[in-house]
Image (tube, rainbow, N blue to C red):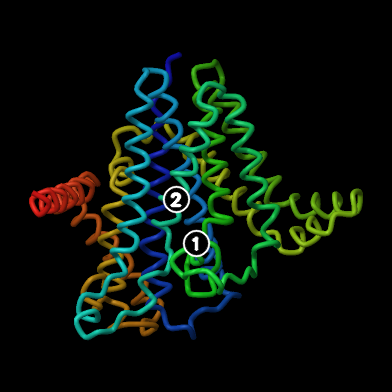
Amino acid sequence: MKANRLFFIDAVRAFAILMMLQGHFIDTLLNPIYRDSSNMAFQVWHYFRGITAPTFFTISGLVFLYLLLRARDKGEDKFRVKKGIYRGLLLIAIGYMLRIDFFGWIRGDFSSYFFVVDVLQCIGLSLILLILCYVLLRKHCKLLSLLLLVLGCLCFLTEPLYRSIDLNHIPKIFANYLTKVNGSIFTILPWFGFTAFGGFLATIFFSHVHRRRFRLVTILSFFITGFLLIDCSGWLFMKLHYWFDVQILKEVAYYNYLFPRLGNVLLLFGVFYGAEPFLKGLLIGKIGQKTLSIYVIHFIIIFGSFTGLGLKHFYLKALNPTQAILGALAFIVVVCIISFYYVKTNAFIYNTVRRLIKAIKNKSQAFKD
């Protein structure tokens, strides 16, 4: 089976990372007095900020499983599985490393902030879970597709059950993956649900992308499904609650934010997949290939990883809208320039960590000898 390269993936990743850059900058530094929910500009900003993380998780599942399925088609999936597990563990490690404050540690200040789970840890663990699903059903693509669809729905539908879960009886390093009580930004539930839906889409693309009119049908499906999830999912769950008298469906309907967010992601996919013929070779695609480098650089600059000194510590909630907008634009340019010319690829980070691990192994072996 011939599996085509999906250029729109890099464009979606680029859009998401740029929205994340401006979102983190403005959210961290904008004075709260200017957060007016009745202001149209603020509503637009808040909308795009709300769909950034769902887009990241969904596109991560899509691109990873799509590449894994392509590798299987070439008989190279064992290497890709090992590489994927390594990458997932590496993302988790980098997520923790970015919360290291060397100066604070030198002073003896070992804050529990280090154990907070953020997007990298959740994406890393989600990719590992996706690999487990693939290994389980690698020879049955249709069953794998169904499993991922079911897992995505279950993650969303059971959200009321774990929304306020109390895990004080287990160590924070594990509890933080399931509860936000200790300050975690993301938790594996419900966010793995977006990755599962992305994996489901990957199976659809891999199995049918070569077919005639696939692009047209898929674009229409993205828009129709997206609008239905946004406008009708809450109504549907209430109807199902009335018909089957299942309490959890009522709770999902009353606090229905996950399915509409997925709908927004699908609309975004529809836009970029429709524009794919015009995106090949553009800068936006190159930006989408450097998301990890960009994420690490922006995190260090804003939140002060390693040194404890970042923009947050000097301008926290201090900027007016004009300063925040101009600053965000400048911030995006600076981070992208650093990523392109000083940290040339995501491989820089992976190779650096590989060299570090190799050096540790060599030291350990020398010590044993």
Q: Residues within 10 Å of mark 1 (few under 14, many from 20)?
A: many
Q: How many numbered markers are drawn?
A: 2
Quarter of the rendering containing residue 201: top right
Q: Where is residue 283 shown, x and y percent of the image?
A: 28, 43
Report how far apart the C-alphas of labels 2 and 1 lie in the structure: 9 Å
64 on left or right of 201 = left
- At horizontal 69% and vertical 55% (from top left) the residue drawn is 158
Asked whether residue 344 appears in the rendered view, the answer is no
Q: Is residue 284 above or below residue 99?
A: above
Asked whether residue 31 appears in the rendered view, the answer is yes
- At horizontal 31% and vertical 82% (from top left) the residue drawn is 315
**Which numbered tag is attached to residue 285?**
none
**Which numbered tag is attached to residue 125?**
2
- Which amino acid lies under the numbered mark 1 shown in the image of this protein? Tyr
- Front-most of residues 125 and 256: 125
Q: Is residue 159 above or below residue 208?
A: below
Residue to which mark 1 is pinned: 177
- Which amino acid lies under the numbered mark 2 shown in the image of this protein? Leu
Q: Where is residue 252 shown, x and y percent of the image?
A: 74, 58
Q: Where is residue 183 shown, x and y percent of the image?
A: 48, 74
- At horizontal 29% and vertical 34% (from top left) the residue drawn is 281
Q: Are marks 2 and 1 in contact (CB under 8 Å)?
A: yes
